[in-house]
Each structure stands twice: as structure tokens, then as C-alpha cells.
Image (tube, rainbow, N blue to C red):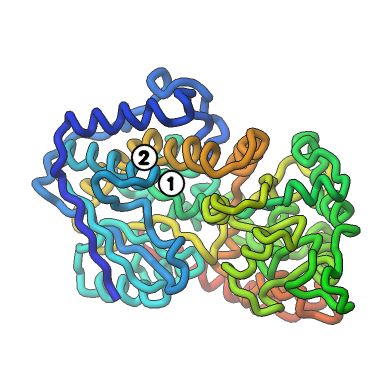
Amino acid sequence: MNRTVILRSIASLLLASFIFLTLSACADNGKPPNKAPGDSNAQTTAVDDTRVYPDVPVVDYDGYVFNALYWYTSGWDWRRSKDIVAEENSADTIGEAVYRRNLAISEKYDISFQLTEESFDKLGAVLRKSVSAGDDIYTVVCQLQSQIMGSVLNGSLHNINNLPHIDLTKPWWDQNCVKTYSIGKKLFSIASDITINDKDGTAAIAFNKQAAVDNHLPDLYELVKSGGWTMDAMENSYKDAAKDLNGDSKMNEQDFYGFLGGRDVAMTFYQGGDALLVDKDADDVPYIAFQSEHNFSLAQRIYELVTKTDLFYDHHAMGTDDAQYQKLFESNHGLYFWMRLDSVSDMRASETEFGILPIPKFTEDQKSYHCIVSPHTCSLLSVPSSVKDPERTGILLEALVAESKYTLMHAYYDVALKSKYSRDDESAEMLDIIFANRVFDLGELINPANIRDLILSASEKKVFDIASAYKKIEKQAEKELNNIVTKAEKLPD
């Protein structure tokens, strides 16, 4: 099913200026914006003093329609695109910023914006059909990360490194994504300031503040800042918190858990523990990075954590969906709650006071925290290989992403996420740590021989011998990875 929304330039410069001044006056009480998401080197100073402008020409594109093909999933309405188009006079902070950003680009380049939505499981086929026909109807495609590799290998995506006017060293492109997701120096998908879907998909931990007090927990924010927020520290803080509230001698949704989570916890804690499924060598060629003493020890520790069902609630095993699982935390049935950051905005009306923390380290001597960007709920930006005017695409993307940094990202990160949705200043500080340490894993995109299931399905195993389990798929995983690398190398530069 398609849903098409067209935004045309119908507002005057006077109205745009009024909206800008109004938002600036209200946002953050006049404070200058903090770091932009994913930009650990950004300066915390006034925008007017530090704004970076794209090095692109201004071209009249005579009404060109910037059409974004975007995924959606039935039942996940809160994850549908809200970062490509927006109506005039939007009552939402994000919508207002999107409208204002698009207005600036529309008037500068004489274009309009269009959103075309397709179900996530059909989008790849729709894109391939369009590319095979030589159609040039989509400017960009925003596909679920878990679906991207199929589009790469069938030749549907353009090498972003070869788009004219794109400067991937600029702060509006996610540098971790650029570094991680290239294959043989070819890049087909990227996270950027154009979209917030990937920011919403970043993993984090929430904690019930009253339950933390009742269970005499230490200052968790200080624990994070000192570097002591580890898996052991987290489990030690919740191991005595679980309670059989209804007295039936079995733990279920009527009881109180130390940690509310699901299958995703295992993979998130693996990457949070400074481990990857697939890494790359000096020539940017991927290789399996799973087999190491560190990774096996980490996987075993995760298994021990997620199989303690009297402490840990696995919502996938218990049959609750995302909304029901989140409701358990909101209704005071858990001390800790594994989440993606889209839950922060979704819980804004909750009466439960909660704080936000990064994914814990494996050991205290780990250099930094790592918060993975979900391959299951968020998309990246790509360009169809059938693009007929790469220069136009490059100019518009660079102009749009630069404008997004100072409009959409400020509204999303500084105004909405840190000021409106977070419950305390300390959580805002934690968000800075989370966004400065967002990570990606190429193994999540490629997933040779379903290698991620070794970790993802750990809780389903009665006996867990990770070394033996990996040995069974090692040859197949290496074969599949080598085939993918070979195919990628043969794609046009």
C-alpha cells in the first residue's frame, strides 16, 4: 500500500522567519544547542558562531520532486517516517522543524518533497523493479537495516562515495556509520542528520527512579560517569529487587522484575561489551570477528544473565509485544527496562519517573560505552542506482543534510529528547554519552550463516557452549561472507 504526501512551497519568507524566531525563543529557554547526535566533536556554542555551511552551488531545479521511498510496518505507527515531510503549522516540535527545513531548501532550489511508503518486506522488491526499469522516480530510499544487504547485492543502490558534492567528513554525516558500513571502500547506506529514525533506534537502559531509591541503589549516573557501569554492576544492583507480588510462587506479568528485556538484550550487550560479529582489515575488507576469548567470555556472561528468569523478564519468551512490554515498565513492574530511544518520547505521558542510562560495559577497563543502532527498527539513507542526475542528487542531499543539522537535529535532540521527554538533567547528560558512543556492526547487515542468532537466541538454550556452536557454522559463515565481499567488489565504483 502506498501513501503519498506532497509538500509544496506555499509559505512566504516572512512566515518562515516568524516560525524560526518563535521556535528559537521557546527552545531550551534560549540556551545554545548542545552536541549534535553522533558528533562527539561538536562544540557546545551558539549556532550563529559555529554553523558550518555546505560547499554546494545553488541551482534552480524547476519544481523537481524530491521523492523518498520509506519503509513502514503495520502496528509500528510510532516508527513511521516523521522526518521527510510535514504539514504547515504542525503542532509537533519535530514536524515544525521538518517543515521549516524543507521550506528553506524548497525555496532555495525550487523543489518539493514527497514521501512514498512501502511495507518493509516489499520495499526491496519495489525498489529493484524501479531500478530494473531504469526509472528515476525515487531520490532516496530509507530501508530497514536488516533488509539493506539484499538491495546492495542486486545492484539497486548507488555508491554514495561517488556522489558529487557529498563531503562525508562533515559533521552532519555519521562518521561511525561511514567507517563501519563501507565494504571495499564502497558505501551504500548511511546515517545522517536528515533522518531521526536511526537515532530513535539507538539502544539504552531506563530505570525506575522510585524503585532505585526503595532498593538502595547507588547514584547510577555517577556510576556511569566514573566508568563503573558494567554488566556485573547492573546485575548486582537488581538481583535482590525482584518480587513475587501476587504470591503464586512463579514470576509473570503481575510481579516485579529486576530487569525487563527481551531477545534484543543479548545482542545489544554483546556489542555494548566491545565486541563485533564482523570487522574489517586495513583494506576495508570484512572478516568474521567472532572467534576470540573475549567474545566467547562475553557471550557466556550474557547467557548467564538472560536465563535467570526469576530476575530477567524476556518479553519475547513470555509472548508480549513491544507495547505491552513497555507498559510493564510504565506500570511499575520492573527496576530496569531495555529500550530503544523511541520509547523515551513514547513514555512522555507516563507517571513513572525514570532515568536514562547507556548500555553497560562488559568490564570496567573497557575504554568506552557502546550503544548499538538497531538493525530491526530503523533505516539508513541510500540512493537508487538508477539515478540519472547524480550531481543534482549530491547537491540536494548535501544541502538538505546541512540544513537538517541546525533545524531538525536541534529540535529532536536538544528541544524534544533532552528537554521535553527526559525527566532530569542527569538523563540529558547520559544522552550525550549515548549519542557520542553509538555503534554499528557490519555483521548485523550481512549476518553470514545467521551468526547473530548464536547470541540473539542464547536465552532459548538449556546448555550454552558458544565455542562449539560457532564451530558448527564457522566454515559456512566465512564462505557466505567471502561471497558477499566478492559480489560487492564487482559492483560499479
Helix, strand or loop under label 1: loop
What's the residue at 14%, 51% (across, down)? 64
What's the residue at 70%, 65% (across, down)? 261
Label 2 is placed on what type of residue? Ser
- The percent coordinates of residue 22 (x first, y second) are 33, 29
Nearer to me, 318 or 289: 318
Q: Does residue 320 sit above or below 238 in this rendering?
A: below
Q: Tell me, yes or no, whether the two marked residues, 2 and 1, touch with CB atoms within 8 Å.
A: yes
In the displayed structure image, the side of residue 163 where residue 363 appears, left or right: right
Q: Does residue 163 sit above or below 268 in this rendering?
A: above
- The percent coordinates of residue 377 (x first, y second) are 51, 64
Q: Is residue 304 visible?
A: no
Instruction: State which quadrant residue 24 falls in.
Output: top left
Observer-side mark, 2 or 1, equals 2
What's the residue at 49%, 21% (across, down)? 45
Q: Is residue 112 visible?
A: yes
Q: Which residue is mark 2?
A: 404
What's the residue at 41%, 29% (across, down)? 26
In the displayed structure image, the side of residue 217 where residue 329 appears, left or right: left
Nearer to me, 146 or 228: 228
Q: Which residue is mark 1?
A: 192
Label 1 is placed on what type of residue? Ser
Identity of the residue furthest to the top in this view: 49
Q: Residues within 10 Å of mark 1 (few under 14, many from 20)?
A: many
